Amino acid sequence: MRILGFSKKWQKLSNLEFTTFRFTRRGRDWEVGELVQVVFTPRSKGGGERLGMAEIIDKQPRNVAPDWGSPDTAMVSNDEAIADGFMNWGDMFDWLCKTHDMHRLATEPMNKLTLRKIGDW
């Protein structure tokens, strides 16, 4: 089972269903129906804090900005950015630019993953 790591304890993680935006995995991309282990700071010393299990229930491609990524892919909306835990789309865009490779942001769509918690956490 793969780990889906978070570097911040977003408020959305307390919801039964929540979204996150992730780049395509080069070895094996995220799949609907896949079970993942949600972990806070997985790369920290000690392996991070295991929050719980979740199932990926939806996956949709999204471009990060206008005229970036694939011309056939919708852009992340302001409502999606807010649901993901940001103040607005601009706040999300600024965070993504600080934490991700600009070349990938400009050329590849991201996966909008919708997850449902399994059990209590």
Image (cartoon, rainbow, N blue to C red):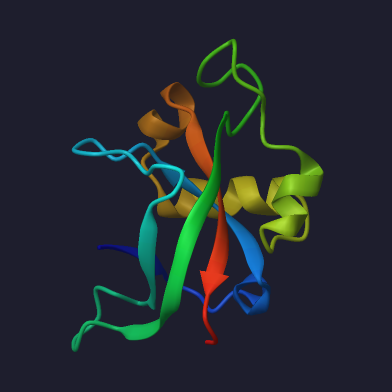
Residue drawn at 46 percent across, 43 percent down: 32
Residue drawn at 43 percent across, 26 percent down: 108
User: At which x and y percent is residue 29?
Assistant: 32, 38
User: At which x and y percent is residue 119?
Assistant: 52, 81
Quarter containing the N terminus: bottom left
User: At which x and y percent is residue 78?
Assistant: 79, 43
Residue drawn at 37 percent across, 29 percent down: 103
Q: Is residue 39 left or right of residue 81?
A: left
Q: Nearer the viewer, residue 51 or 75?
A: 51
Residue 85 quadrant:
bottom right
Residue that sits furthest to the top in the current view: 71
Q: Is residue 89 above or below residue 36?
A: above
Q: Is residue 118 above or below residue 103?
A: below
Residue that sits furthest to the right in the current view: 79
Residue drawn at 67 percent across, 36 percent down: 76
User: At which x and y percent is residue 21?
Assistant: 52, 48
Number of numbered tags placed on the structure image:
0
Q: Nearer the viewer, residue 15 or 91?
A: 15
Q: Is residue 96 above or below residue 8?
A: above
Q: Is residue 20 left or right of residue 104?
A: right
